[in-house]
Image: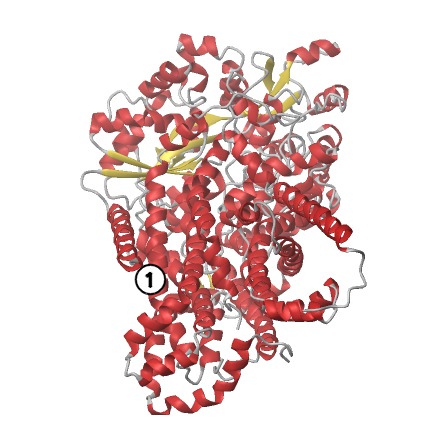
């Protein structure tokens, strides 16, 4: 489950764990829960009340610009959503977008982190440059790519590669993925870099002594050590990228047709162009349920590998 | 030694936050919150607004957003009867509907109490498009119709002459002849960007003049008729063969840039484009364009009718103050101020007839002033459409569902322009959408 | 440290390594420049006149001007900047105040149901921001919180809490148990434990969490645009107002985008060391 070569800190912790389990038996559970309460109560109030309202709205037929039309239709909205072919397209696009963006940004982030994990001139400057895409406003980044990179006549991509390709029209989803990958690669790179730099020097040197070459060191020691970081990066990246809205809103408006519409954008369209509150709320609820199902499986997988059990670690 | 420093930093930040929070609660004195769309003419108004603040002592706070977002925000606010905004900028699409819903304040009493405002000066078609039961519920800021801009120099070079009232077939032929791939000059620029206010505006006028319509008098959706198909095929083919690159995501601004950089021989779009075409700071082809009426096929005229106007939500708190501002931004003096301060090309066009009597304006806008006025005057359903329809609007269907329906159909159109689906597929899907809407109206009739 | 060396003699090996190292460094530099080229272009464009900004082929040489920046500030950038700064500061502060005790409870003094609590926090991030907007709009309207910075502060805090708790918890797990046991034996109560023992150890972690909070609060776009208007508008709202529907003013937009992103860029650049250190301390347990 865990790597056979552990930093000493972790090994020590594992040894003291059983002792820790017994030690605080005297404290009451309530006193220990107390520090958690402010955050928990705040979160419950601020997130669950809107969520409950969303569920209530999802049971109604309510069009904001047709006053007097609001009434309960219970599960009708949900039926309509599942029958809607545009919803299915948006769902597929969301999955494709998330999977490819996370994978690509992680691979590129890994490559960049490896390049940075060595002594070189101006290493700090290079690292500073590379994290900047993550620091600018996503809205600014999307506009930047739309006008300076993807524009058919004035864009840099066509300037470099020649031709008249209308990237946003001919390759909409790919273009959006490219922009998101550009924005999120620094985040992945930072996490992985942290993982690389937390490797124990002794372990690496020991491997070198044993005659292992670069690739074997990477495969047997670095990669397992990194796996936790990679998994965290995947989870966080996925949660944020699933909700990507700015890029699509500002670059393609979901088009052409519905080629680059993802779920958040489709919900936005239903709510702010159709002003159909009932349907957009139903879609929101469906997205929550789907994300929870996927995340539960993913988390279970992660927790098992992390050996986090029963809140001890 | 880090602790005191951190505490100091925290204190400073809290102070800043406190100021920001206090600002949100609102300073004393009269303040008006105005929600407007981010267009150049509006920018000029914002710049001049210092005058208004000085004269009246009212503080103005502008909320400027791009069109789609401004619409969404304003609609959400007005429809839920929130009092976020004292003045909102809406178009002739929303005005009659919202007036009917009782969301807007009737402006007739205010107009009558204002000497010299002269509401009869407003161009009649514009005026009636903002009225409900003969009362104005929104006052126009600028109005537009649509016409065709063409490069006189390129026409001369090719030995072509533009007729006074061209047909779409003639335009298609011109576009084929003038389309120059080597020089990267498109035969014609037409909008293809999704949006009921983007590609659907020019497209619907084309459909109208080909004899088609969205719905017939009995609210049957008519997107599957031969006329509609012919119009759609025509539009899509023209754009794909001789239109600009990137047409499926080109809206007003993108086409404007291309035409202004000299990369299109013709451009069919809103009459306000003329202001930008003739503006030296952004256009490379000043003085080279001619302007003719919107091309037709089966109808007398084809231009659309659109106006950005100011309205007052019924729940606004300072109604008198709101009216003061609305009056200031739409009266005759404002037109003169913009002309004198920013140049006569920047004057809000197409709403007051008196503007077209100002000599400086007619001189500066010689190329397009009269065509604009003519287009707006002729923009009525009788002139622009072949048959009768049960809804208001020339380039849009004046029902609340149209924002949604129009956007969905425009997405299909844009996909057809991008070559992802065929015209038949686009129309089949669009017919379905329209039919659902039509059904609701058939039932409630 | 003795090895059996079957490789080529030291001199050639060293030279080979140096050449390889230099070319690798050069490669890294080239890749970095290429990667951030869009940003470099944005900076260049913000110094151009409008006519130079949109040309075919793109212009590298041009007469620079500060007009665009002046124009941005003229348009009232500073109040939006103040709002963003205030909101970001408040949110970061409140998130840390809530997250540190919560993370403590979930790590050092764990209770039954920790996994459930963690899972719950994470699940709150699964409702798309877009779907909750109408209920939030209606609630804010009723509570008179529309166009008010406090609405944003509350929302952003709830948005960032899950991540902050998750991160802080991992940092807490790094604190050596022996230190804490020793302090407890010495009779230290919770606040002293926290201040003197734990916080110094996790300080880089706090910096890392704070930086993430700052980034996500500053750049949040959707709630800001929909729930604020004139008084409480933040920087993304200001930027969006530059996108006009009639005419592309790309140079001005670049200047606005640059000014809008600059504060967080500077903070990020300064704090990146802390971030990496904090994360490498074991953000992943």
- Across and down, in percent, residue C251 comes to 51, 30
Subunit of label 1: C
- Across and down, in percent, residue B161 comes to 70, 11
| Residue B312 seen in this snapshot | yes
| Residue B141 seen in this snapshot | no
What residue is drawn where x is 42% and y is 30%? C69
Q: Is residue B29 left or right of residue B278?
A: left
Q: Quadrant of residue B92?
A: top left
Q: Nearer the viewer, residue A240 or C281?
A: C281
- Across and down, in percent, residue A235 comes to 57, 66
What residue is drawn where x is 67% and y is 20%? B265
Q: Say few, some or many: other residues with alpha carbon within 10 Å of mark 1 (under 14 / 14 to 19 / 20 or more).
A: some
The residue that disc 1 covers is C94
Q: How many marks?
A: 1
Judged from the image, the secondary structure of the residue bearing numbered disc 1 is: helix
Q: Quadrant of the N terminus of chain B?
A: bottom left
- Across and down, in percent, residue B254 comes to 59, 31
Q: Is residue B151 above or below residue A142?
A: above
Q: Is residue B20 left or right of residue B227?
A: left
Q: Quadrant of residue C10?
A: bottom right
Q: Is residue A51 left or right of residue B259?
A: left
């Amino acid at each position: 489950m865990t790597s056979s070569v552990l930093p000493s800190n972790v090994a020590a912790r594992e040894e003291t764990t059983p002792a820790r389990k017994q030690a605080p038996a005297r404290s009451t559970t309530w006193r220990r829960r107390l520090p958690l309460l402010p955050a928990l109560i705040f979160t419950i109030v601020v997130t669950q009340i809107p969520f409950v309202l969303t569920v209530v709205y999802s049971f109604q037929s309510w069009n904001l610009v047709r006053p007097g039309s609001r009434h309960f239709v219970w599960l009708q909205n949900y039926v309509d959503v599942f029958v809607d072919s545009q919803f299915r397209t948006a769902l597929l696009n969301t999955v494709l977008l998330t999977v490819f963006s996370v994978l690509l940004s992680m691979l590129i982030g890994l490559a960049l982190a490896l390049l940075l994990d060595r002594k070189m001139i101006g290493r700090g400057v290079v690292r500073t440059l590379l994290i900047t895409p993550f620091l600018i406003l996503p809205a600014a980044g999307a506009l930047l790519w739309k006008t300076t990179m993807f524009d058919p006549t004035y864009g840099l991509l066509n300037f470099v590669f020649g031709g008249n390709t209308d990237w946003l029209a001919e390759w909409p989803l790919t273009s959006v993925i490219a922009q998101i990958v550009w924005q999120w690669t620094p985040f992945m790179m930072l996490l992985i870099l942290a993982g690389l730099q937390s490797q124990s020097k002794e372990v690496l040197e020991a491997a070198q002594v044993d005659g292992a070459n670069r690739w074997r060191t990477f495969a047997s020691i670095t990669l397992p050590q990194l796996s936790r970081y990679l998994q965290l990066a995947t989870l966080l990246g996925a949660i944020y990228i699933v909700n990507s809205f700015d890029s699509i809103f500002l670059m393609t408006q979901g088009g052409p047709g519905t080629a680059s519409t993802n779920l958040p954008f489709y919900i936005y369209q239903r709510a702010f162009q159709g002003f159909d509150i009932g349907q957009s709320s139903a879609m929101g609820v469906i997205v929550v349920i789907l994300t929870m199902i996927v995340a539960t499986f993913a988390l279970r997988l992660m927790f098992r590998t992390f050996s986090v059990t029963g809140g001890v670690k | 030694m880090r602790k005191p420093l951190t505490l100091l930093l925290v204190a400073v930040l809290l102070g800043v936050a406190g100021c920001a929070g206090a600002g949100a609660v609102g300073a004393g004195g009269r303040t008006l919150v105005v929600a407007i769309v981010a267009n150049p003419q509006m920018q000029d108004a914002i710049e001049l607004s210092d005058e208004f603040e000085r004269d009246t002592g009212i503080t103005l706070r502008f909320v400027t957003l791009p069109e789609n977002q401004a619409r969404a925000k304003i609609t959400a606010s007005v429809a839920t009867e929130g009092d976020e905004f004292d003045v909102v900028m809406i178009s002739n699409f929303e005005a009659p509907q919202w007036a009917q819903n009782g969301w807007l304040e009737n402006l007739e009493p205010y107009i009558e109490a204002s000497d010299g405002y002269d509401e009869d000066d407003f161009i009649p078609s514009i005026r009636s498009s903002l009225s409900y039961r003969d009362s104005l519920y929104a006052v126009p800021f600028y109005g537009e119709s649509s016409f065709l801009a063409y490069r006189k120099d390129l026409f001369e070079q090719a030995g072509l002459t533009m007729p006074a009232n061209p047909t779409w077939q003639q335009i298609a032929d011109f576009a084929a002849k003038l389309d120059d791939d080597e020089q990267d000059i498109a035969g014609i620029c037409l909008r293809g960007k999704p949006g009921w206010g983007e590609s659907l505006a020019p497209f619907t006028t084309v459909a109208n003049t080909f004899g088609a319509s969205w719905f017939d008098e009995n609210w049957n959706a008519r997107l599957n008729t031969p006329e509609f198909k012919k119009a759609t095929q025509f539009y899509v083919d023209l754009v794909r063969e001789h239109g600009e690159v990137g047409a499926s995501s080109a809206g007003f601004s993108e086409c404007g840039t291309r035409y202004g950089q000299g990369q299109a021989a013709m451009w069919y779009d809103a009459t306000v484009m003329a202001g930008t075409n003739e503006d030296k700071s952004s256009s490379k082809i000043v003085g080279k364009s001619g302007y003719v009426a919107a091309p037709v096929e089966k109808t007398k005229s084809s231009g659309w009718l659109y106006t950005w106007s100011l309205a007052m939500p019924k729940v606004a708190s300072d109604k008198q103050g709101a009216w003061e501002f609305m009056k200031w931004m739409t009266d005759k003096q404002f037109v003169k101020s913009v002309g004198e301060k920013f140049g006569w090309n920047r004057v809000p066009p197409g709403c007051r007839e008196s503007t077209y009597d100002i000599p400086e304006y007619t001189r500066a806008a010689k190329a397009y002033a009269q065509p604009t006025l003519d287009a707006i005057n002729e923009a009525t359903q009788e002139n622009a459409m072949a048959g009768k329809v049960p809804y208001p609007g020339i380039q849009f269907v004046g029902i609340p569902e149209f924002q949604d329906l129009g956007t969905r159909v425009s997405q299909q159109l844009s996909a057809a322009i991008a070559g992802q689906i065929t015209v038949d597929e686009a129309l089949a899907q669009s017919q379905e959408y329209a039919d659902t809407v039509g059904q609701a109206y058939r039932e409630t009739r | 440290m003795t090895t059996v060396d079957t490789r080529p003699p030291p001199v050639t090996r060293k030279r080979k390594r140096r050449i390889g190292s230099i070319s690798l460094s050069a490669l890294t530099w080239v890749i970095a420049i290429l990667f951030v080229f869009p940003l470099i272009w944005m900076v260049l464009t913000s110094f151009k006149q409008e006519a130079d900004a949109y040309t075919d082929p793109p212009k590298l040489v041009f007469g620079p001007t500060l007009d665009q920046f002046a124009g941005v500030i003229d348009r009232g950038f500073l109040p939006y900047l103040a709002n963003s700064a205030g909101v970001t500061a408040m949110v970061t502060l409140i998130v840390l105040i809530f997250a540190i005790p919560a993370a403590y409870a979930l790590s050092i003094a764990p209770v039954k149901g920790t996994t459930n609590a963690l899972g719950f926090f994470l699940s709150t991030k699964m409702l798309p921001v877009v779907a909750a907007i109408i209920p939030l709009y209606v609630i804010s309207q009723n509570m008179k919180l529309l166009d008010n910075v406090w609405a944003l502060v509350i929302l952003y805090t709830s948005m960032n809490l899950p991540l902050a708790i998750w991160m802080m918890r991992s940092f807490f797990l790094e604190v050596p148990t022996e230190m804490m046991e020793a302090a407890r034996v010495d009779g230290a109560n919770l606040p002293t434990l926290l201040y003197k023992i734990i916080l110094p150890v996790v300080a880089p972690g706090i910096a890392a969490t704070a930086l993430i909070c700052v980034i996500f609060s500053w750049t949040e776009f959707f709630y800001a645009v929909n729930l604020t208007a004139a008084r409480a508008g933040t920087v993304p709202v200001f930027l969006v107002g530059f996108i006009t529907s009639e005419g592309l003013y790309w140079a001005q937009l670049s200047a606005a985008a640059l000014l809008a992103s600059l504060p967080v860029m500077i903070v990020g650049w300064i704090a990146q060391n802390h971030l990496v250190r904090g994360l490498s301390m074991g953000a992943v347990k």
